[in-house]
Structure formats: C-alpha cells, structure tokens
Image: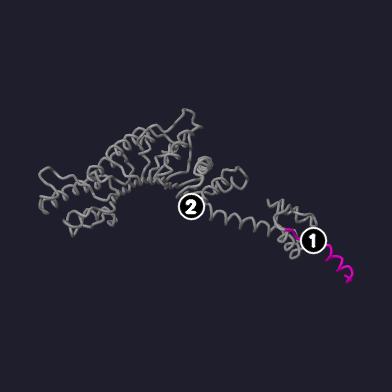
C-alpha cells in the first residue's frame, strides 16, 4: 500500500471525540452488527474507536470483546445488588432507580437476594417509602430482608404501607400477622415467593406477606411482652406460618420469664431447630417465699436449676438447640460453673451435661 493510500485511510479513521454516551456510529458496519448481536447498542466514543483500531474487521474478535464486556458488567452489578444495603439519601436514589421500570432496573431487581434497609432519607422520607414499596413488589428473588428504621419515621412508614395493603396495624405490633391479607384479592397482597428470612428491628411492625409459609428464619428486634408473645403464637397457629419456621430469634421484655416462654414457643413452632432469645435479664419468676433480696443464694440457685431442668426436658423432647444470649447476672453470680451465656453451648448433649453437673 502506498504512503498516500495509508494517509487517506488514517484520515478516514479520524473522528472528533465527544464526551458522554452516544449511539453506535457507522464507520464500521461490522461493529454495529456485532453490537446488536451481543445486546450492546451504545458505547463511549473513545472505547468504540479503540476497539476498531485494535481489532479492525475481525468480526469474531469484536463479538467476543463485546460479550466479555457485557458479562463483566453483569458480574459487577450482581456483586453490588445481590446483597443490597441502603440507607439515607442512597436508599432514596437506589429505590427510585429500581422502581423506574427500565430494562436495567428489571435486571437489577432480579439480582437482589438480600436487602438491608438501615435508614431512609431524612429530608424526604415519604418519597423513599413510596419507592421502597414499589421496589418490594419487584424483588421476586429476594431471600432475606432486614429493616431497621428510626422510630421517628415509624408512623410514616406504617401509615403508607397500611394504605397500600402491605401492612396491617391495629395498635399492637403483632396484630399485623393475624390477618395477613388486607383484601381478598390475592394480587393486592405483597408476594415474595423466595423470601425465607425476615428480620425486623426498631419499631417496624410485621409485614403482611403472602409467602409467610415459606419463611424459615424470623428475627424480631422489638422487645416483646406477654401480650405480644401471645398474639405471635396465636397468629402462628391461625396463619400456619409457624410450621415452616426453623430458626426464631426474639427479644423479650424483662417482665417475661424465659422458662415460661420456651415451652410455649416450642409447642407453637414444631419445626423449630434454633431458638435464640435476647433479654437484659433472664426474668426468672421466683416463688413468693423466695425473693431476690431476702432469699439465700442456695434457695435462688435451686430454683434456677429446677427451671433449667424443665428446659432440658423440652430440648430433649424437641431435639433442637436452645440459645439464650445476654443471660442474667443471677446465673453469672450464683452459678459460677454454669455458662453465663447458654448460647455458647453448641449442641444438645453439652447443654444437658452442663445442667446435670450443677
């Protein structure tokens, strides 16, 4: 090829670069054809001509590099959206994008397996909540969801979700479960078929989800009293979602006696494998003749052992691991040899041995 022809060819390749994203130009028809075949219809101008300069008219090479770029983009998006943690202004922007209905938003919604909401935009909480509800209905592959909201936005969230038929609240947190569907129309109820883990913290009430029967892990961070426990167990029986729960983590009020709650929970949740209870004080109910102030350590210790023996019988019958976190100071002070955190006992046999040796 003569020098004159080479210069002419080089001039034909010189195109003014413009910033931003543009539609594929047509100096290389092959590139446009290959981009359509691989699902990529636009590229940065700089990247476009770099590919042309390096690969020329090699259709296979162009097709391969475009497919590779698409795959790398999907991998990066999956790592970002499969475990999605949002809060504040980021939550507002992210939910708005996912709820937009664009091709990318549909792709990203399908990627979300774990969603953690750790706060909302304080400047515009209503917009964030609206977008959040819209996004929830599109997360068909959602497996785990955790919600932690500041109590100041609790009523705003509850009110809007209630009007949209996603949440039911009648004054007590656990009446949200008793009637799951706000409407008899099944399409008006939020359905997340893949959801198996739900964690709710702060003052967020329970979501009315049509797929309660698929839940295997339920974590409730709000402090529950006897009334809350009663309604939770009644709802588990009525709605039958208790049959699928294998792991239950609850935070109990200091007024609740753990020895009273454990047997009842085990009865209501027959498939339970792990029960985790959190409480500042273990809340043991002492007989009238035994008070924490006037009774001897031996008397209180004997009473605690009796209640722990009841736990052992329950564990033996149900064959599951019982974990109690933040056990009371009473156990640590009076039963020096007994583990202060029963959650450190890994299996049933070790737990039973610990009881027997007291």
Residue for point 74% across, 64% down: 55
Q: Residue at x 38, y 41 (%)?
A: 244
Whether residue 211 sits left or right of residue 98 in the image: it is: left
Q: Does residue 175 appear to the left or right of 78 in the view shown?
A: left
Residue 209 position by quadrant: top left
Q: Which colour scheme is used?
A: one colour
In the rendered image, the quadrant that contains the N terminus is: bottom right
- Label 1: few (<14), some or many (≥20) within 10 Å? few
Residue at which label 1 appears: 15
Which label number is shown at residue 85?
Answer: 2
Verify whether residue 16 appears in magenta: yes
Q: Measuring 54% from the left and 46% from the top, which residue is drawn there?
A: 95
Disc 2 element: strand
Between 345 and 206, which is closer to the camera in this rendering? 206
Residue 198 at what x, y percent from top left?
41, 45
- In this rendering, the answer to whether 183 lies above or below 287 is above
Q: Quadrant of the C terminus?
A: bottom left
Q: Distance between the residues labelled 1 and 2?
A: 43 Å
Tell me the number on the disc at residue 7. Answer: none
**Range covered by the magenta-colored residues:** 1-18
């Amino acid at each position: 090829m003569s020098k004159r022809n080479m210069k002419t060819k080089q001039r034909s390749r010189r195109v003014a670069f413009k910033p931003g994203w543009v539609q594929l130009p047509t100096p290389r028809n092959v590139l446009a054809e290959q981009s359509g075949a691989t699902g990529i219809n636009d590229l940065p101008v700089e990247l476009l001509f770099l590919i042309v300069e390096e690969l020329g008219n090699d259709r296979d090479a162009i097709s391969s590099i475009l497919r590779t770029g698409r795959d790398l983009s999907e991998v990066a998006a999956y790592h970002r959206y499969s475990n999605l943690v949002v809060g504040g202004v980021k939550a507002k922007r992210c939910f708005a994008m996912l709820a937009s209905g664009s091709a990318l938003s549909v792709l990203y919604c399908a990627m979300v397996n774990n969603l953690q909401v750790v706060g909302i935009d304080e400047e515009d909480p209503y917009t964030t909540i609206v977008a959040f509800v819209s996004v929830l209905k599109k997360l068909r592959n959602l497996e785990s969801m955790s919600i932690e909201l500041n109590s100041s936005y609790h009523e705003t969230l509850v009110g809007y979700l209630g009007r949209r038929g996603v949440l039911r609240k009648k004054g007590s947190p656990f009446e949200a479960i008793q009637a799951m569907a706000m409407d008899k129309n099944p399409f008006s109820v939020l359905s997340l078929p893949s959801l198996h883990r739900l964690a709710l913290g702060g003052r967020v009430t329970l979501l009315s989800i049509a797929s309660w029967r698929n839940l295997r892990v339920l974590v409730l961070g709000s402090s529950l009293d006897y009334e809350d426990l009663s309604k939770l167990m009644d709802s588990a029986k009525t709605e039958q979602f208790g049959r699928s729960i294998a792991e239950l983590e609850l935070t109990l009020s200091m007024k609740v006696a753990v020895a009273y709650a454990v047997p009842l929970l085990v009865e209501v949740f027959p498939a339970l494998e792990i029960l985790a209870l959190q409480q500042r004080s273990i809340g043991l109910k002492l007989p009238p003749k035994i008070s924490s102030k006037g009774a001897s350590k031996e008397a209180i210790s004997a009473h605690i052992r009796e209640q722990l023996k009841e736990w052992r019988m329950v564990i033996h019958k149900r064959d599951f691991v019982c974990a109690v976190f933040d056990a009371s100071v009473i156990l640590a002070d009076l039963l020096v040899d007994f583990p202060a955190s029963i959650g450190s006992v890994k299996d049933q046999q070790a737990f039973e041995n610990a009881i027997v040796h007291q």
